[in-house]
Image (cartoon, rainbow, N blue to C red):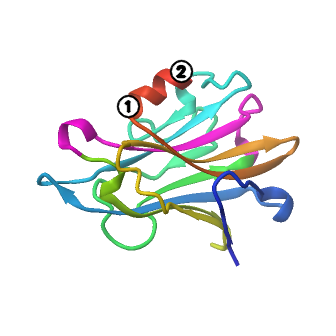
Amino acid sequence: MAIILEKKKPIDLTKQNPGLRNIVAGLGWDSKEINGQPVDCDVSLFMLGENNKIPGEGFFVFYNNLNSEDNSINHMGDNRDGDGDGDDEVINIDLSKVDEKIVQILFTVTIYESEARGHNFGNVNNAFIRIYNKLNGAEICRFSLTEQYSDSDSLLIGRLYRSEKEWNFEAMGDAFSGGLSTLVNLYN
């Protein structure tokens, strides 16, 4: 049975699941059409070193760069409207291939052209991130957003991080405004 995560309370993924190597991060949401356009959420990953920066462009995974430089992460593509049940965007991660210089992987969600379209996270419902075992499909943990974030167009939803030789996952839910460019400037 999956662990329902609370904000800022991490779990130990690999210690609780010995041999876990291949995981999938599924992110989902239901959006509305606002001002004649569906709210388009985009998932991006920032693979950070000890200095809290990406060591190079190949460690920033998003809709225009679907694979990490070390081949540990594969983003399965952009969903532009949040239609349908289940995961809207899917990221495959092979923990054994993550470059040694990477100490954490941030999962972010931003709203495409939020300012021009008048969109914010108050227009997004039922948002979640879940981590599951790729080999057997067993869900390990899930974090569902319960806050509205109607002032924000960007969200740090969770992070994977190393703790010695183990991998942990922490639900974050930290919202702000400024879009993807703000995050790129922060972590570049």
Give the magenta part as a residue range. Answer: 96-118
Q: Nearer the viewer, residue 70 or 111?
A: 111
Q: Quadrant of residue 104?
A: top right
Label 2 element class: loop
**Is 63 colored magenta in this rendering?**
no
Q: Residue at x 36, y 42 (%)?
A: 153
Q: Image quadrant for the N terminus?
A: bottom right
Residue 167 seen? yes
Q: Which mark is residue 178?
A: 1
User: Looking at the picture, does residue 60 appear above or below residue 123?
Assistant: above
User: Percent position (x, y) of residue 14?
Assistant: 81, 57
User: Residue 80: x and y, percent?
Assistant: 29, 53
Q: List the single residue furthest toward the bottom.
A: 1
Q: Secondary structure at mark 1?
A: loop
Q: Which residue is mark 2?
A: 188
**What's the distance in space between the residues labelled 1 and 2, CA to CA?**
15 Å
Q: Say what amino acid the circle numbered 1 marks.
A: Gly
